[in-house]
Amino acid sequence: MHVPRPRQSLASVIPTATMADIAFLLIVFFMVTTAYSLDRTPMELPATREQQQTAKGSALIAITADETIRFSEGEADTTTVDGLDGLDAAIRTVTARNRLHPFVIKADRRVKYRLIDAVLERLRLAGAENVTLLSQGEGA
Amino acid sequence: MKLRRRDVPAEIPTSSMADVAFLLIIFFLVASFYSVTRGIQFSLPRHDEAALVAEPEAAVLIEIDDAGSLAVDRRPMALDGLRGYLEPRLARNPGKPVILRTSLEAPYRAMTDVFDELRQVGVTNVVIPTTAELAQYGLEGGS
């Protein structure tokens, strides 16, 4: 005997609401962990096996292979400073506010140590203590 | 006349939201991959005269010449030899200061290579005196 069944209509919908939840969680994760480069000058960084994360908001001193010095207090992008004297004034502006403010030196690996020595000396005289030499992981 | 009621499904369209979210994920992924924010940390000594003027047998002096070659306690040594030289000394005194003096004409890379090796060996007390600092203590010509 043929029994007529009530027709069930199944909506052809893929539930995407939870996917958005996961996606937004991932976005929040990457937003929190991403630190933007304050200096996008292309340069060859020295390679090291030791790699420690720099503190967010660190002041950045960028030194290119042609010995141009750029500086950022840690919030805006780097700008070119007028040689070592200009850098000295910029460093002192930061250390006058907070002596423990971290500094990052991003220097091309071909730069002569003479310039790095001069920068370290200015940092030392300005009272800076926490310095990170930016590097790329070995094999990177 | 009777108007026919249209059934509007009570649903918020979320499919495009997922598209936007995944685009943002890709953006942050790429941004985090390309930003170089890692390196070797160290503290600039403020008044570390003690390490600089330490007795020769108390501190290890590493000098890097113009070509990037090493001399450890005045003896030429390859970078690979540092571990074998330092490990027994660190076993006796884990806080042994190591003074790293780099020639002004040497490439910056030579200094970071040695500094990295020292960290790999486990040296915690690395002193990187500047030329002015050495002159201040009368050590610019070698200690």
Image (tube, coloured by chain):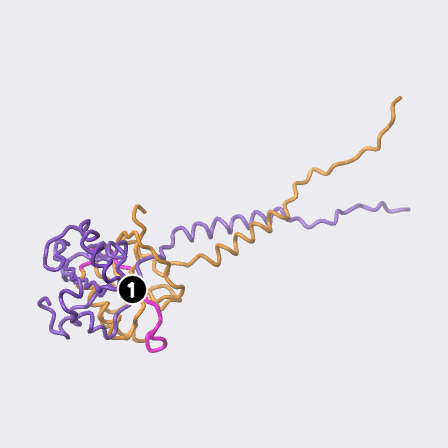
Chain colours: A orange, B purple
Residue B19 at what x, y percent from top left? 56, 47
Give the residue type that dot 1 points to.
Phe
Residue at the extreme top = A1
Picture quadrant where residue A67 is located: bottom left
Residue at the extreme left = B141
Chain bearing tag 1 is B
- Residue at 57%, 50% (x, y): give it: A22
Examine the rendered structure and indicate whether residue A47 appears above or below residue A114: above
Residue A1 at what x, y percent from top left? 89, 21
Picture quadrant where residue A54 is located: bottom left
Residue A115 at what x, y percent from top left? 20, 64
Which residue is at the front of the view, A75 or B130? B130
- Residue at 22%, 70% (x, y): give it: A121
Which residue is at the front of the view, A45 or B64? B64
Residue A99 included in the magenta stretch of the image:
yes
Examine the rendered structure and indicate whether residue A125 appears above or below residue B83: below
SS of the residue under disc 1: strand
- Residue at image mark 1: B42
Examine the rendered structure and indicate whether residue A124 appears above or below residue A22: below
Residue at the extreme bottom = A96
Left or right of A98 on screen, residue B23? right
Residue at the extreme front = B92
Which residue is at the front of the view, B23 or B41? B41
Residue B87 at what x, y percent from top left? 22, 55
- Residue at 16%, 68% (x, y): give it: B131
Total label count? 1
Magenta region, residue range: A95-112
How crowded is the residue under tag 1: few (<14 C-alpha within 10 Å), some, or many (20+)? some
Residue A3 included in the magenta stretch of the image:
no
Picture quadrant where residue A131 is located: bottom left
Examine the rendered structure and indicate whether residue B135 appears above or below residue B30: below
